Image (spheres, rainbow, N blue to C red):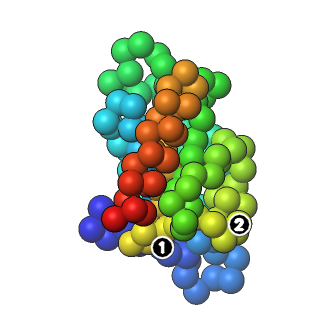
Amino acid sequence: MEDAAVRLVPDPDDPRSRLAFPTLLLYPAAYETDFIKEFEETQSLEDHLAYVFPLPWDADGAYRLPNVSCYVETRDGGLLKMGKKASLLKVLSTGKVEVVDQVVRIFVLPLDKADEWIAKFKEQKAREKKK
């Protein structure tokens, strides 16, 4: 992970190259993560979840492509739902997504746990703003 950085791929000198971002897939309901070294701006989340799933630790099969929703944190501490078929460029070009230390963070949750997790996330952010 130490050499992971936003970069142009495949060749930084080629004007046809694409931006690639190091990306963390966070599974907060399971306290697990996956790291994608190069998530290209033209790729969708579905492109990556297709090879990441099934997850070796997901014995219940809760994390399958049709059964998850995905979110990115916004600059103001909110959440933006990320469509699985949307390109990373489309999501980042909203201007709302926060990229911390050159790493994109995507929260992946089973549909049946998403609402509860979102409520807790918003509660925590509200407490942090009061401090």
Q: Which of 18 and 78 lies nearest the eye of the viewer?
A: 78
Spatial CA distance of label 2 from label 1 is 18 Å
Residue 49 in the image, given as x and y percentages of width and height: 54, 38
Number of numbered discs: 2
Position of the N terminus by quadrant: bottom left
Per the image, the residue denoted by label 2 is 94
Please tell me which residue is depicted at 67% across the width and 59% down the height of the picture: 91
Q: Residue furthest left?
A: 2
Residue 23 in the image, given as x and y percentages of width and height: 46, 57
Per the image, the residue denoted by label 1 is 6
Q: Which of 123 and 46 lies nearest the eye of the viewer?
A: 123
Sequence-earlier tag: 2 or 1: 1
Dividing the picture into quadrants, the one containing residue 127 is bottom left
Q: Amino acid at mark 1?
A: Val
Please tell me which residue is depicted at 63% across the width and 66% down the height of the picture: 96
Residue 35: mark: none
Dividing the picture into quadrants, the one containing residue 30 is top left
Please tell me which residue is depicted at 55% across the width and 76% down the height of the picture: 8
Q: Is residue 89 visible?
A: no
Q: Which of 47 and 122 lies nearest the eye of the viewer?
A: 122
Q: Secondary structure under badge 1?
A: loop
